[in-house]
Image (cartoon, grey):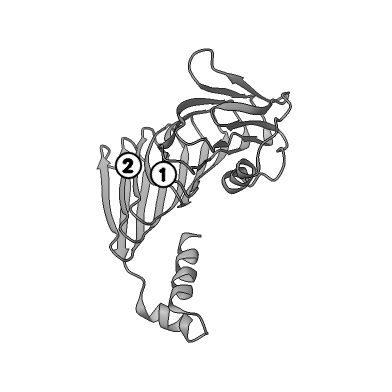
Amino acid sequence: MKVLKEIDETQRRIFEEVAELHEIPVGAYNLRANGESIGRNSTAEIEIKSKTEGSGLEIYVKPGTKNQSVHIPVVISESGLKETVLNDFFIGEDCDILIVAGCGIDNCGTANSQHDGIHRFFVGKNSKVKYVEKHYGSGDGSGKRILNPGTEVYMEEGSTMEMEMTQIKGVDSTERKTTAALKKDAHLVVRERLMTHGVQYAVSDYHVTLDEDGSSADIVSRGVARDNSYQKLDLSITGNAVCSGHTECDSIIMDEGRILAIPSLEANCIDAMLVHEAAIGKIAGEQLVKLMTLGLTEQEAEEQIINGFLK
């Protein structure tokens, strides 16, 4: 176990924002700040190792591990720092674990700061994984805060993975690419929440392949585009067997914001059941009026509606 190095108040605040860490977490963890590990702990069931080549981690979860967690948040508070990190998760059979990731960038300088984090999950037979990833940006500098997450998921028979992907403040540019391949009776659930403002740019690209009978995927993305920001949502499911898939894009557009939703369903089996839903619209006037009659200003009413929508 490594002793946690001193971190400053900005880094501490960002750890709280992206991973709700007010202190060193219980269980397995790797805390990363400004390009280096500042604290790490493995347990008897979960081992965290540095890659022998390149920057990143290998996380091994022993078969049968239950009710344990892995925290691997990243903080960048140095203007101009750019990094690419590859983390691999090897999850044994019959596990039930929580993985908390996320990245926060505080940029008070003039140079762009960027973190490209690629996570690969190899989920064993009959295992259950909950994965929580939050992205956050802050700082009053002119340098951009750029986050490009990549996620690859490979699910064995009977496994389940639930993913919560959140970005609600401060990230200037992001391109999220997620791919998943599911075997027999594997189930994937994704809940994405995304808000952009100013001139921010965000792309969410999901491509899921249901390869064997009984597999299923349910992907729901909710987004709010404010000011002059732009969002592109590309949700794709391919059904190659007796399977079921559902994607949903539900978005609110405000000011001069722009949103492009691209649904894609491909059925290569007569018994594949695939459904897509999409809706883009502004906040309904009657919702604003109702809240304003309760004493809220128009701005306060808008915030209440947005907060409820993104929950």
Q: Is residue 168 above or below residue 63?
A: below
Q: Calculate the distance from the C-alpha at mark 1 to the C-alpha at mark 2.
A: 8 Å
Q: Residue furthest front?
A: 110
Q: Report x, y in % for residue 83.
A: 45, 28
Disc 1: which residue: 217
Q: Residues within 10 Å of mark 2 (few under 14, many from 20)?
A: many
At label 1, the amino acid type is Ala
Res 116 label: none
- Quarter of the image for residue 49 reads top right
Q: Quadrant of the N terminus?
A: top right
Residue at position x 43%, y 35% from top?
Answer: 114
Task: Name the side, left or right, on which 30 lies relative to 190.
Answer: right
Among numbered discs 1 and 2, the one appearing first in the sequence? 1
Q: Is residue 294 above or below residue 247?
A: below
Q: Report x, y in % for residue 311.
A: 51, 60
Check disc 1 and report its element: helix, strand or loop: strand
Check disc 2 and report its element: helix, strand or loop: strand
Q: Residue furthest bottom?
A: 293
Q: Residue furthest top?
A: 52
Answer whether labels 1 and 2 touch (C-beta < 8 Å). yes
Q: Residues within 10 Å of mark 1 (few under 14, many from 20)?
A: many
Task: Name the side, left or right, on which 17 lies relative to 24.
Answer: left
Q: Report x, y in % for residue 241.
A: 33, 36
Residue at position x 39%, y 46% from top?
Answer: 172
Q: Nearer the viewer, residue 214 or 274?
A: 274
Task: Name the side, left or right, on which 229 lies relative to 62.
Answer: left
Figure label count: 2
Disc 2: which residue: 237
At label 2, the amino acid type is Ile
Q: Nearer the viewer, residue 252 or 219?
A: 252
Q: Report x, y in % for residue 287.
A: 41, 78
